[in-house]
Image (cartoon, grey):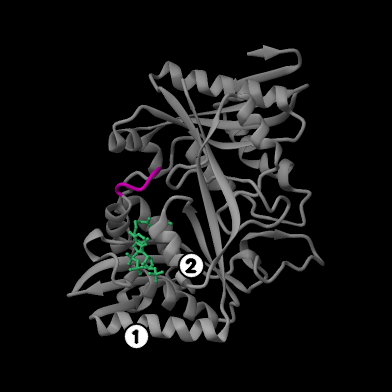
Amino acid sequence: MCAQSVRVEQISTRERFEDFARFPFEVYGGRDAWWPPDIHNEIELLAGRSLIAAHLDLSPFCAWRDNKLVARVSAVVNYRYNEHWNEKLGQLIHFEALPGEDEAAGALLETAVNWLAKRGMTGARSGFAAFLDYPYAIDNYGELPSFLLRGNPDCYHRYFKNAHFMTEKGQVDYTAPLTPPTLARYRQMIEAARQRGVVIRSWREYGFLAAIDVWTDVTNSAFARHWGWNPVSREEVRPMLLPLAGTLVSDLSMIAVFEEQPVGAVFSVPDLSGTLARVRSGVRLKPERGGGTRGALINIGVLEMARGRGIGRAMAARSFLTMAQHRMAFAGYTLVLDDNWPSRRTAESLGAKVSANFVSYRRDF
Ligand SMILES: CC(C)(COP(=O)(O)OP(=O)(O)OC[C@H]1O[C@@H](n2cnc3c(N)ncnc32)[C@H](O)[C@@H]1OP(=O)(O)O)[C@@H](O)C(=O)NCCC(=O)NCCS
C-alpha cells in the first residue's frame, strides 16, 4: 500500500526480519539506558521457527517513508488465546515507530488490522499477549523501565488513538523499598505461613527443573481466568527458563507447598540491568531502577483453593528477603491489572507503591 512517500509491506525475507528486529535501536538507541531486543529470538519468531510459533499465524509488517524504515508491527492470530477465551481477537505485537511518523504509523496499523479482519478476527489488541507483548508506558518517559516492560515514546498513544484504538486495560508496576522494618515484617509473614503448615521453598531447594514444571502448572491454573492470559506448555517454558538454573533466579523464585502439594509459585529475577540493559557510559541509574539494586518479582500465582491464607504474600516476602540478602535495596512487583485487587493488595501489604503505569489498547471491528 502507498500513501505519498509512505510504503507499508508484509515482510518475509531474512534480511527484512533482521531490519525489523533491529528497529528498536533506531527508536531507543539515543537513550541513556534501555533494554535492547533479543535479535536472534525475534528473528526465530518472525521466521516461524520458535516453539510458540506453532500456536500463531503471524505476519510482520514494516512502514517506510522515503525508503527509511519508520515503523513496524506484527499481526497475530493466536489460536491458543482464541480457543481458551472463545474469542476471535487478533493481536498486534512488536509495535514500534519513530516520533513524528503519524502518517506511516496510521497506514501500518490500518494494514495490520485489515490483515486480521480478513482472517475473521472481530477485534485487535495491542499491548498484552502472554510471552509476546507488554503494555505501553503512560509515564516515566525516557527512564529505564522495569525489566520486560516498555519505555515507549509518548507519541505511541496518539498513533493508537488516531487508528481508532481505545484503552482496554490499565496496569501498574510496583516498587517496594527493602528497609530493615519492612524486612522484619517479611520474616513475620513467612513465619505466619509456616505456622499454618505452608512450606516456602526456593526453586534451588525444590529442584530447578521440577520447579519450572510446577510454575507452568500453577500459573496455567491460577491465571486461567486472568484477563489476557492463555495457557502455555511445559515444552515451551522449559527451554526458556532452564538456562537460568545456575543464576540467582533459583534463589529468588519460590514454590509454596501445602499438605505436600505445590499450591503457589513465584518467578523473580535479580537486577539484570548490568547484563542486559544498554547504559551509556558514565550514566548512573537511579537505585530503584537498576544498577544492581533492583530485583523484580515477575509473576505470582496461588491455586484458587489455597488463596486468602497469606501464601502469596509469604512467597513474595521470602523472595524480597533473599533480594535484600544479595544487596538489592528495592523489589519490583511487576505488572498488575488496575482491577486485580487481590494482587494489588498483596503488593501493598508488602510495602510496595505504584511506581509506573501502563495501558493496553483494543479496537473492535
Ligand atoms: C494474587 C494472588 C497471588 C494472591 O495470593 P493469596 O495467597 O490469595 O494472597 P494472600 O492470602 O497472601 O493475601 C495478600 C493480601 O491480599 C489480600 N487479598 C487476597 N485475596 C483477596 C481478594 N480476593 N480480594 C481482596 N483482597 C485480597 C489479602 O487480604 C492480603 O491483604 P491484607 O494483608 O491487606 O489483608 C492470588 O489471588 C492469585 O493467584 N491470583 C490469580 C493470579 C494473579 O492474578 N496473579 C497476580 C498477577 S499480577
- Image quadrant containing the N terminus: top right
The residue indicated by pointer 2 is: 348
Residue name at image x 48 percent, y 33 percent: 125
**Above or below 110: residue 48:** below
Residue name at image x 33 percent, y 30 percent: 87
Q: Secondary structure at mark 2?
A: helix
Residue type for callout 2:
Glu
**Ligand 1 has an atom within 8 Å of the beta carbon of the residue at disc 2:** yes
Position of residue 113 in the picture relative to residue 122 (left or right): right
Position of residue 161 in the picture relative to residue 245 (left or right): right
Q: Quadrant of residue 99?
A: top right
From this viewpoint, is residue 325 visible? no
Magenta residues, as a range? 224-228
**Above or below 291: residue 37:** above
Give the main secondary structure of the magenta stretch.
loop
Front label number (1 vs 2): 2
Q: Secondary structure at mark 1?
A: helix
Residue name at image x 43 percent, y 16 percent: 118
- Image disc number at residue 167: none
Is residue 14 rendered magenta in the image?
A: no
Does the residue at mark 1 contact the one at mark 2 (Cβ under 8 Å)?
no
Residue name at image x 59 percent, y 34 percent: 17
Q: Position of residue 10 (x, y in %)?
A: 56, 23
